[in-house]
Amino acid sequence: MRHGRSATLLVALSLLTSAATAHAERVWVLWAHVLPRSGSEEHHLDSAYPTRQECEQAALGTASVLKLNGFTAITGNVPGSHEIHAEKGGNHWRFYCLPDTVDPRGPKGGAR
């Protein structure tokens, strides 16, 4: 009977440890969605961050860099949103953060 309790406790601790590890390893990805004048849209992985807040800060930093390079950049079109919309020469870009479990390109990174 005592051996059964130890095994159950060991399994429970193992599950808790793996759940905590999986949560701690979540990564936030800054994506660039490009809509060129030609009309062929693309998604590019820009960079990755350990927290959503760090990813959103990087997106805001991207807006500053874009503005310095002659882009029209708009931040936070929607209250609470940290998306960046930029335009230059008829091409449009959108930068936004998603958890690493979400790929905007669709299943297995294919085109949408």
Image: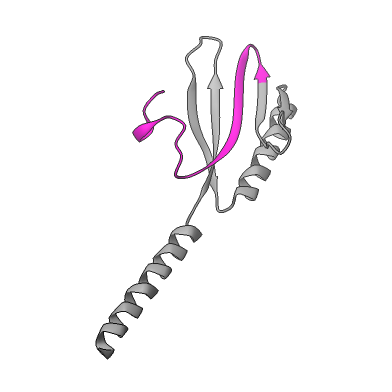
On the picture, is 78 further left or further right than 95?
A: right
Q: Is residue 17 above or below residue 7?
A: above
Magenta region includes residue 33? no
Which residue corresponds to the image point at 49% horizontal and 28% vertical from the top-left?
43
Q: Which is more toward the observer, 52 or 58?
A: 52
What is the quadrant of residue 75 in the picture?
A: top right
Please provide percent x and percent y for residue 90: 63, 11
In the rendered image, the quadrant that contains the N terminus is bottom left
In the rendered image, the quadrant that contains the C terminus is top left
Magenta region includes residue 88? yes
User: Number of labelled discs?
Assistant: 0
Q: Is residue 49 above or below residue 34?
A: below
Please provide percent x and percent y for residue 103: 44, 36
Residue extending furthest bottom? 2
Which residue corresponds to the image point at 39% horizontal and 75% vertical from the top-left?
13
On the picture, is 26 further left or further right than 6?
A: right
> What residue range appears in magenta?
87-112
Please provide percent x and percent y for residue 31: 54, 35
Q: Is residue 98 above or below residue 66?
A: below
Please provide percent x and percent y for residue 48: 53, 45
Which residue corresponds to the image point at 55% horizontal and 30% vertical from the top-left?
32
